[in-house]
Image (spheres, rainbow, N blue to C red):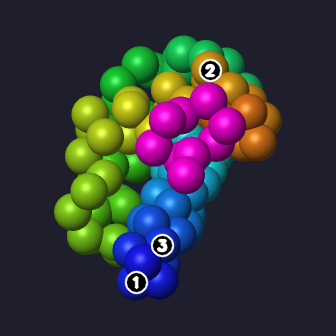
Amino acid sequence: MFILNSRKKLAYEVNNIMLFAYWNVGRIIVENEQNGNIKAEYGKQIIKELSKELRKILGSGFSVSNLFNMRKPYITYPKFQTVSGKLSWSLL
C-alpha cells in the first residue's frame, strides 16, 4: 500500500512539474514573443524560429506543433492555479 501511494504521489508531482514547465513556455511565448497578443503578428514564423532554437538548446519535444499546444493552457488559464485544478491528471 505504501509503495502504491508513493507511486501516485510521484506521478502527481511529475505531472504538475511538467504542466507548470509547459504552461510557462506558453506564457513566455505569448507575453514575450507575441507581446501579449493571442496571435503573433508574423503567425507561425515566430513559433517556427523559436522551435528551432529550443530544439538546439533543449533537444526534442519543442516542435512547432508542441509549442502551439503549450500556448493553449496559458491562453485558456492565465493563472496557473486554475489550470492545475482543472486538468484531471493533476488530481489524486
Residue type of the residue flagged with mark 1: Ile
C-alpha gap between disc 2 and disc 1: 36 Å
Determine the secondary structure under disc 3.
helix
Residue 14 in sight here = no
Question: Residue tagged by mark 1?
Answer: 3
- The location of residue 15, given as percent across then percent down, is 47, 58
Residue depicted at x 45% and y 21%: 42
C-alpha gap between disc 3 and disc 2: 31 Å
Q: Which residues are magenta?
A: 84-92
Q: Are marks 2 and 1 in contact (CB under 8 Å)?
A: no
Which residue ends up furthest to the bottom in the rendered image? 3
- The location of residue 63, given as percent across then percent down, is 24, 46
Residue type of the residue flagged with mark 2: Thr
Residue 22 in sight here = yes
The reply, left or right, for residue 45 in relation to residue 81 is left
- The crowding category of the residue bearing disc 1, from other C-alpha atoms within 10 Å (few below 14, some 14 to 19, many at least 20), is few
